[in-house]
């Protein structure tokens, strides 16, 4: 229904001002809350006093809550009742009169504040105030009692427990794992009162005993406490090469802040690294590193570590320069382009072509960050079967050193010649004879062995040519003998960026070839590492807005595993000292 509500206000000069509002609703609600159709903002009015309904017999008012004594109809206190034209509904200090309908309104009401609210307001304020004197305790005595409780709980108790009570079982060693099960003298360790914040997740097993790390009260945590567990933490620089005591002698807690709860205990801000690396010439003038301050704006081009001599096992860091692209001399003969042919490659013995992808050979390691080494037996042997005798296609050579291959050839043909039954067309009759017959004479044995040596030599020429070993390896002659061959040793780096960290499992959305130009690579010497612009297309510095924010520790470790330990464990230091 449509309701006209007319709010009447008496001015100082006695005149009446009216303000009309029209509401459309099923029922008219009255009360102090702003969600009522008729708002009555006086202190003595409940949030919801009652509801006015329209029924077949007319209008009917029904009160709500425990404040129904605030309601009257035509001067009579009531909880509910019918109202008619001209009726006056009293709600607290307000009189609400039912007026004749006007215009499109089905119901018209006038609202006027007719009774003073001052006394009611003062009464509410007086009854809602409780003074401390009313409970029989003075402010001074309560303050002294609170001070005493604080001093005992947060000062006296922890000090007594630390200096007087023996909380440490002498039968237990200093090992933190054993200390985790030690018996406390109190149900709760008193030093927990001094905890400045939650302990990080990895250290929660010792969070209930502060003495694990804080050996002495009021003395900061010493490095030997950290190295008792973290004995293999290595240095950031070699102290013998760079004299940087601010790094090599810095306390562990100068970088690792505990009691930060779920926040990482290691520093990850960009400024931590760039404070030194943006102007390296001022810190270490003889360094070969290049200045860097921001991955998105100020980072040098990648310099991968490649093999320069596989036999001597030498490596070199080379700049990814487009004009002079680095090569890796691994002695491996391989072409990615052939193996990634869109039409596939022919699989021997199956009369089918298989379309290969990167994952056919490069399978993730246990953590998924890198890749397991490519193995001949697992990844290559299905196509490169190493069979050497056409009449015995199931017999294959082992994938090993040259001596093992030569011995296998000689043993195979020597056994075949002396045993007999060879199906080779140009073999002499004594070799093709039925096996298990009579014993050979000395002349026949020499004839069979002569054929075996020739067959082994011929097979060696085929095996060490480009059709078998030479398919993937650099093969050379070492002399004029029948089987004088050498296969160059293969050495492939497992990580082109050994000082960096990259997780392939987190970059699985783009395909391998989006970053590595393998389909166009025709030589094994190609270094298929993308330049930095490929990475900065998605990654920016710490404050990057439309790219992935990346700090230095996103790709680099502070403690480098090729340096010596940063600190000596306490037990080792004690052993050396005494």
Image (tube, rainbow, N blue to C red):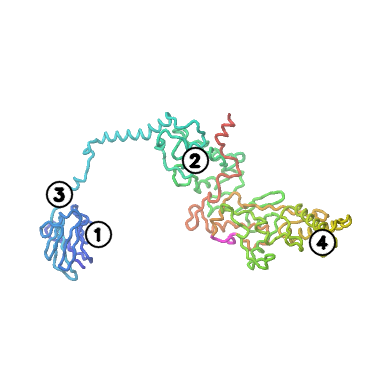
Mark positioned earlier in the residue sequence (2 or 1): 1
Mark positioned earlier in the residue sequence (1 or 4): 1
What percent of the width, then of the height, locates residue 263?
46, 47
Helix, strand or loop for disc 3: helix
State the extent of the magenta-drawn residues as a range: 509-515
The residue pinned by badge 1 equals 35
Q: Quadrant of residue 8?
A: bottom left
The residue pinned by badge 2 equals 254
Q: Nearer the viewer, mark 3 or mark 4?
A: 4
What percent of the width, then of the height, locates residue 442?
88, 55
The residue pinned by badge 4 equals 434
Q: Nearer the viewer, mark 2 or mark 4?
A: 4
Magenta region includes residue 307: no
Q: Tell me the CA gap for discs 2 and 4.
A: 84 Å
Q: Tell me the CA gap for discs 2 and 1.
A: 57 Å
Circle 2 crowding by C-alpha within 10 Å: few under 14, some 14–19, many from 20: few
Front-lying residue, 423 or 144: 423
**The N terminus - image quarter:** bottom left
Q: Quadrant of residue 565?
A: top right
User: Does any portion of residue 10 appear in the rendered image?
Assistant: no
Q: Tell me the CA gap for discs 3 and 1.
A: 26 Å
Front-lying residue, 202 or 4: 202
Q: Tell me the CA gap for discs 3 and 4.
A: 131 Å
Circle 1 crowding by C-alpha within 10 Å: few under 14, some 14–19, many from 20: few
Q: Tell me the CA gap for discs 3 and 2.
A: 65 Å
444 in relation to 221, above or below? below
Tag 2 near tag 1, CB within 8 Å: no
What percent of the width, then of the height, locates residue 396?
73, 58
Q: Tell me the CA gap for discs 1 and 4.
A: 110 Å
The residue pinned by badge 3 equals 119
Q: Nearer the viewer, mark 3 or mark 1?
A: 1
């Amino acid at each position: 229904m449509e309701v006209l509500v007319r709010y009447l206000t008496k001015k100082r000069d006695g005149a009446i001002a009216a303000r009309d509002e029209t509401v459309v609703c099923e029922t008219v609600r009255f009360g102090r809350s702003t969600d009522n159709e008729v708002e009555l903002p006086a202190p003595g009015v409940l949030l919801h006093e009652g509801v006015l309904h329209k029924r077949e017999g007319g209008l009917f008012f029904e009160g709500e809550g425990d404040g129904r004594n605030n309601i009257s109809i035509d001067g009579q206190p009531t909880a509910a009742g019918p109202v008619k034209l001209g009726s006056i509904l009293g709600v607290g200090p307000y009189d609400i009169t039912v007026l004749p309908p006007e215009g499109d309104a089905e119901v018209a009401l006038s609202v006027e504040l007719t009774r003073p609210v001052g006394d009611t307001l003062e009464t509410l304020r007086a009854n809602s105030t409780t003074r401390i004197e009313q409970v029989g305790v003075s402010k001074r005595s309560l303050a002294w009692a609170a001070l005493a409780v604080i001093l005992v709980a947060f000062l006296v108790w922890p000090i007594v427990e630390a200096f007087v009570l023996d909380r440490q079982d002498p039968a237990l060693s200093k090992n933190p794992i054993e200390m985790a099960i030690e018996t406390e003298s109190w149900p709760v360790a008193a030093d927990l009162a001094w905890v400045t914040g939650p302990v990080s997740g990895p250290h929660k097993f010792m969070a209930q005993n502060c003495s694990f790390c804080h050996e002495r009260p009021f003395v900061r945590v010493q490095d030997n406490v950290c190295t008792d567990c973290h004995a293999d933490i290595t240095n950031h620089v070699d102290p013998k090469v760079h004299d940087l005591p601010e790094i090599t002698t810095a306390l562990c807690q100068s970088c690792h802040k505990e009691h930060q709860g779920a926040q990482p205990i290691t520093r990850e801000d960009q400024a931590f690294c760039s404070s030194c690396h943006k102007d390296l010439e001022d810190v270490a003038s003889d360094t070969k590193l290049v200045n860097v301050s921001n991955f998105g704006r100020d980072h040098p081009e990648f310099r991968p570590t490649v093999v320069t001599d596989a036999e001597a096992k030498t490596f070199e860091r080379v700049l990814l320069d487009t004009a002079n692209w680095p090569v890796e001399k691994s002695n491996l003969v391989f072409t990615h382009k052939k193996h990634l042919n869109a039409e596939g490659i022919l699989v021997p013995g199956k009369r089918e072509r298989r379309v290969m992808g990167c994952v056919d050979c490069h399978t993730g390691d246990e953590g998924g960050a890198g890749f397991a080494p490519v193995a001949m037996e697992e990844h290559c042997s299905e196509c490169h079967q190493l069979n050497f005798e056409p009449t015995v296609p199931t017999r294959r050579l082992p994938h090993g050193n040259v001596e093992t291959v030569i011995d296998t050839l000689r043993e195979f043909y020597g056994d075949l010649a002396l045993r007999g039954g060879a199906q080779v067309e140009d073999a002499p009759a004594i070799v093709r004879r039925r096996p298990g017959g009579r014993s050979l004479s000395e002349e026949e044995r020499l004839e069979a062995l002569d054929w075996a040596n020739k067959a082994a030599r011929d097979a060696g020429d085929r095996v060490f040519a480009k059709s078998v070993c030479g398919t993937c390896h650099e093969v050379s002659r070492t002399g004029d003998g029948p089987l004088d061959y050498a296969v160059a040793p293969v050495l492939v780096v497992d990580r082109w960026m050994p000082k960096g960290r990259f997780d392939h499992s987190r970059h699985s959305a783009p395909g391998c070839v989006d970053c590595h130009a393998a389909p166009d690579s025709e030589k094994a010497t190609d270094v298929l590492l993308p330049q930095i612009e490929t990475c900065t297309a998605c990654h920016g510095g710490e404050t990057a807005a439309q790219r992935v924010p990346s700090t230095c520790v996103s790709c680099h470790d502070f403690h480098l595993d090729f340096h010596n330990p940063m600190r000596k464990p306490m037990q080792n230091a004690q052993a050396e000292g005494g």
